[in-house]
Amino acid sequence: MPRLLSALLLAGACMPALAAELPIFDAHIHYSHDAWESVPPKEAIAILRKAGVKRALVSSSNDEGTQNLYAEAPDIIVPELRPYRSRSEIGTWARDETVIQYLEQRLAKYRFVAIGEFHLYGADADLPVPRRMVELAKQYGLMLHAHSDVDALERLFRQWPEARILWAHSGFEQPAKVREMLRKHRNLWSDLAFRSDHGGGGEVAPEWREAFVEFPDRFLVGTDSFTPERWHYIGEHARWSRAWLADLPKDLAEKIGWKNGEAAIFEPFSKRR
Amino acid sequence: MSQMSRWIAAAMVLAAVAPAAADEAVRFDENETAMILRHGPWPQPPVRDPSNRVSGNPAAIALGRALFFERRLSPGGVVSCAHCHAASRSWTDARAQAAGIGELVRNTPSLWNVGRNRWFGWDGGSDSLWSFAIRPILHPAEMGADAGHVALSLRADRQLACLYEGAFGLPGNRSPANDERVLVNAAKALAAYVETFVSGRTPFDDFRDALERGDAASAARYPLEAQRGLKIFAGRGNCAMCHFGPNFSNGEFHDTGIPFFVKGGVDPGRHAGIQRLGADRFNLLGNYNDDRSGDSATKTRHVDAQHRNFGEFKTPSLRNVELSAPYMHNGRFATLREVVLHYSEIRADRLHSDGEALLKPLKLSPREADDLVAFLRSLTDPQAEQTALALSGIPNRCAGSTSR
């Protein structure tokens, strides 16, 4: 009886601890110009640490935000370069040739692991500015973080078949289409930011479970702090992610929760230091 | 004649009645006309809440009216419901952010036609009007009471006790369970009373009905600037996509690009509202729901917080909107014109690219902004003040006898 009691106590102690302590690699964080004053770097890093975010892939409009955060916490922040000087360029950057010079200057000055997150749809992917961006990514050996539809994604792969692409929000596609794309492109990873369909109520949706099981090494979680206020959602997002990840086998949960980010994003970056 | 044919005919009539110079004539196309007609008729049939067995009950309405203005519901007799929801101020308080016992972070919503809502409060944290009434009673910064205090207040006052008995019978001996039942019944009486806050017809309603009848002469009495504003509202402004239906609200929640920082953090809006609703012992899944069919609780059973809900707030009704300044969930805008200009120049970069796709900067000219404001003012019931004062009149003395 005492042994059984001990076992139960041990199980009771371990299970919540596992869920609570699962580190998070947050693959979709922005720290843009309007966030710097309302959530200063020290506060931003404190939010990440409190949320148990082990690592964060951060891009900002403009890049100064990312650099400030990286200087504050190089152990957490993994910088990527967004081709926007302000968030208002989301819809114009692909036709704005001044973006190229901006990218070239930042790439020459700082180290990054990726270019993105950028918004790019359909045939716009073949415009001169995105084409040059892809060339720069190739030159510097960087991942692309694409908020794109399937058409644009295919065009990016045609430009650079060896590209490593992180598909923002998994394209907001249905899981069957996401699986189809992951089968087709072995260098494609999918982030699950700003979508709730895979893990609502702390349960993994069956069609998503099949996707995670088929591609255990290709999914990552992310908050998407697209406004300053959303920095205050990072902790809640981590809690929410741990809840649905707990519905998966432990090794799979750990991969999606943080290990995939470490392998696909942090390790290449750490080798570049 | 099919409904669509009637709408087309109505649109042609309206186009024909536009009387002024040609450059001022307002023509509504088929889609705009259909959209306009969907904002009526008004008034709608009375609301009856199946989760509240005293909804529409005159005795409960009388008790609710007495309680609404009863400051003794808050410890120390400091504030009543009417403290924030003043009849003379269109059931609001004219403050940017409410203040009860303490300071709050949200604007006091008007209560006109509130019974028509699906969710209650800026964050939809309540799923019934009666549970919505419990929230301020218990909130430490609003009325700061508890069930025991409410039950004691009802028992201690002969008039209130009499009204209570008329609506619900004797409250039973004092016990935590009985006190909580008295609190819930008091809230259901308050809800029954507030359901009677139905606004009257407006110039827009007259125009809308004339449009439906094909009555050109009556339609022509609607001011041209309001007609031009209505055209923006129902057309390129996309306003009617959310401010939809006879009560000018789809009853749902949206991020309209309003910053939601508050002192010490953020107001998470709908996201926290859903979580609070789930934890609320007075929600429709609980024992106090009088709807034995269970149908009224379906929405509560299935609602689940989504990432997009963070920073979303409820689409308010626009009926009598002119009378309920300041505006938005945090009272950020003092005037209707400021609200219109917000949507005119809305910062699309504050909205998720896969979120509120309807919201684009309208880039209104000054005259267009004026027209939209003129339309919004045409949603004012000219009798609103008199109606509110009549609703807030001194309740009849309780005619029944209490056994106490």
Image (spheres, coloured by chain):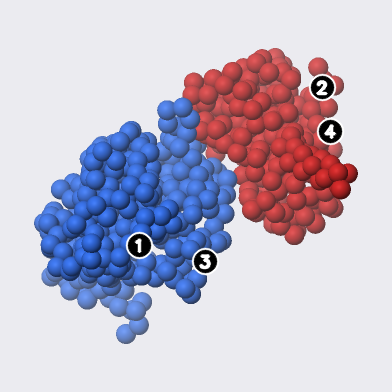
State the separation of the CA atoms marked 1 and 4: 66 Å
Closer to the observer: label 1 or label 4? 1
Mark 3 = which residue? B298
Nearest to N terminus: mark 3 or mark 1: 1
Q: Residues within 10 Å of mark 2 (few under 14, many from 20)?
A: few
Q: Which mark is residue B277?
A: none
Amino acid under disc 2: Ser
Which quadrant of the figure has residue B60? bottom left
Label 4: which secondary element: helix
**Residue shown at the point (42%, 31%) measured from the top left:** B262
Closer to the observer: label 3 or label 4? 3
Which quadrant of the figure has residue A44? top right
Nearest to N terminus: mark 2 or mark 4: 4
Q: Are marks 3 and 1 in contact (CB under 8 Å)?
A: no
Mark 1 = which residue? B172
Mark 2 = which residue? A270
Query: On what subunit does the disc labeled 3 rest?
Result: B
Judge by depth and name the residue closer to the eye, A73 or B188: B188
Residue A8 seen from this side = yes
The chain in red: A
